[in-house]
Image: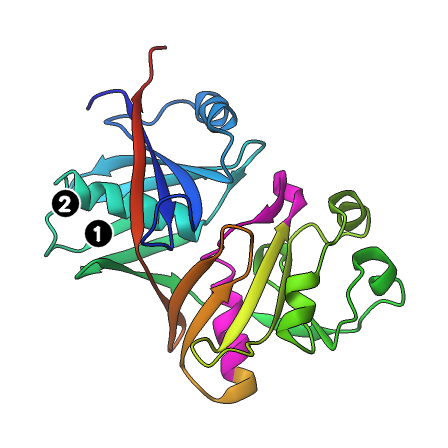
Amino acid sequence: MKNIIYQVDAFTSEAFKGNPAGVYITDNLPSPERMQNIAMEMNLSETAFVMPRGNEFEIRYFTPVSEVDLCGHATLSASHILYETGIVSAGDAIKFHSKAGELSIIKRGKSIVMNFPVYSLRKIDIPSSFRQSTGLDALELYQSDYNWKLVLMRSEDEVIEASPNPDTLLNAGLGELIVTAVSSRHEFDFVVRCFVPNMGIAEDPVTGSAHCALVPFWNMKTGKKEFRSFQASRRSGILKVKLMDKRVEITGEAVTVFKAELLI
C-alpha cells in the first residue's frame, strides 16, 4: 500500500467539527517507536494504524505520548477510510483486532456502526479534596475500566462550564475523567465532556470509547437502552448509542479532511 496518512473528522457530518484522527493503513505495521513518532508528528488525540490480516484487520492506537488499547473516534475514522477507499465494500462488515479485543463494524447509509465492549462501573466515595482538585460539585463518582472516573453533575450547564486544570487532575489521580449530566435539550438524552491529561489530551473533543461506560451508566439511571449523546467540547460531536447485552453499539458519521504522503 502507498505510504499515505489520512486525517478524518469523526462523529460529525461537517469538516472541522467532531474529533480529528489520523489513519495510516499499511501492509506491515511499523515498529511501536515509529508509530509513536508518527502520532507525535500528527499531534492529534489519536492516530490509528491498520494492517490487513486476511479478510480482517489489526488496529493499534497512539496518542502523541503513548499507546492506548481502544479509541472510538479513531476506529470510526479508520472504518470510514476503509469504506471510502474501497478497501472494504460498503455492504461488507469490518472486523478489527485491537488490544481491547475484537471490534465489529458495519456501514448503514452514511453512518458507521461500531460494536464495542461494555465497561464496568463501581460507585466510589467522593474524596473531600475532589471539588478543590476539579472545580466540580459532583453528585456521584464512579470507577470504570481503563482508569476512567465518571462524574455525575446536576445539570448540563455545570458540564459545559467545567474547566478543570490538567495538571491538578493529574496530581489528584484523575487523569481520565468523564463529566456527564442529563441534557436540557429535547434532542439529546445526556451531555458529556472528557478530560484526559494522562494521555497528553487536556480535553478530548469527542470520545467514543467513553460511551462504553456512559451507556451502561445511563441505562442504570433511566432503564433506557438507546440514547443520543452530545459531547459539549469546543468542536462538539453527536453520537447515537445503544446497549446490547454486554456490548455497546456506537453510531456516527465521519468526513475525510486531507491525505498526505509520508516521505520518510
Q: Is mark 1 on a helix, strand or loop?
A: strand
Quadrant in which the N terminus appears:
top left
**Residue flagged by tag 1: what amino acid is it?**
Ile
The residue lying at 42 percent from left, 49 percent from top is: 17
- Chosen colour scheme: rainbow
Return the residue at label 1. Answer: 94
Q: Does the magenta stretch include residue 206?
A: yes
Q: Does the magenta stretch include residue 217?
A: yes
Q: Nearer the viewer, residue 240 or 225?
A: 240
Return the residue at label 2. Answer: 88
| Residue 92, quarter of the rendered image | bottom left
Q: Is mark 2 on a helix, strand or loop?
A: loop
- Please tell me how crowded label 1 is: few (under 14), some (14-19), or many (20+) other residues with Cα within 10 Å: many
**Residue flagged by tag 2: what amino acid is it?**
Val
- Please tell me how crowded label 2 is: few (under 14), some (14-19), or many (20+) other residues with Cα within 10 Å: some
Q: Residue 143, percent across and down? A: 66, 66
Outermost residue, top side: 264
The residue lying at 75 percent from left, 72 percent from top is: 138
What span is in magenta?
A: 196-219
Q: Residue 57, percent across and down? A: 25, 42
The residue lying at 35 percent from left, 45 percent from top is: 15
Quadrant in which the C terminus appears:
top left
Callouts 1 and 2 close, C-beta under 8 Å: yes
The residue lying at 37 percent from left, 74 percent from top is: 242
Q: Is residue 223 above or below residue 156?
A: below
Cα distance in 3D space between marks 1 and 2: 7 Å
